[in-house]
Image (cartoon, grey):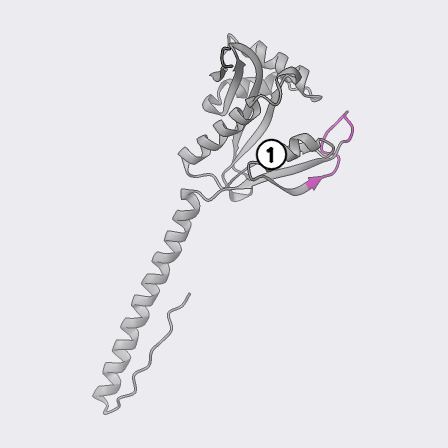
Amino acid sequence: MTRASIELGDVTHHNLKQLKKINTVVFPVFYNDKFYLEVLDSGELTKLAYYNDIVVGGVCSRIDSSENKRRLYIMTLGCLYPYRRLGIGTKMVQHILNYVERDGNFDSIFLHVQVNNEGAIEFYKKFGFEIVETKQQYYKRIEPADAHVLQKTLNTKRNNNNNNNSSSSTTQQQTNSQNNSSSSSSSQQVNGLDNHTNAKPKA
């Protein structure tokens, strides 16, 4: 028995219509031409999913820099119904996770899911996503209109760099404090006093 092949491929002008068909079938939301023009320029952030060389799904994402953070927003991620539970969705999510890990400068990954889509919510929770907010009347012309915001917070180089900067600041403060303490002690000794004060460094 031949093992099934699951692969991801680039989205180009030549296969963009296939992505449009997938999204039209899978999602109750209509995506306009502007959406697909942005998708063409997104590189590794957008992929088509192939099952034995047949296009069966796709993922579209973009970089979001709002709220003074650098986040990855999953706009769409879906698979045709007959091909679900075959590892295709997992392949697409893993691609996104690998991308942000290689980049190392993302604070989080997030997406919107209809509040009644329990299957999708449980699927993303397996990868460490959590419901962080519920937006009322997020969707137009579909019911329910409310959406959960699912987010996965990342421990990336970006956060590590912030911690390193904090540590460097603390170390410098400790050095300055120690120097001040030594100067104070020397001054006191010159004046005939021997009271050494250990100043605590500022956090």
> Helix, strand, or loop for circle 1?
helix
Q: Residue furthest left?
A: 190
Q: Is residue 202 shown left or right of residue 42? A: left
Give yes or no for residue 71 being in the magenta stretch: no
Residue type, label 1 = Tyr
Name the spot of residue 174 as percent of width and height, x first: 33, 67
Q: Quadrant of the C terminus?
A: bottom left
Magenta-highlighted stretch: main secondary structure? loop
Q: Is residue 132 left or right of residue 190?
A: right
- The foreground one among 68 and 45 is 45
Q: Residue at x 34, y 57 (%)?
A: 168
Q: Is residue 117 left or right of residue 83?
A: right
**122, 59: nearer the viewer:** 122
- Would you place residue 80 above or below residue 161 in this image? above
Write the residue at 30% across / 87% down. Answer: 195
Residue at left offset 74%, top offset 32% = 116
Residue at x 40% of width, y 43% of height: 157
Q: Which residues are magenta?
A: 134-144
Q: Quadrant of residue 138?
A: top right
Extreme residue toward the bottom, this view: 192
Q: Which residue lies under the disc numbered 1? A: 124
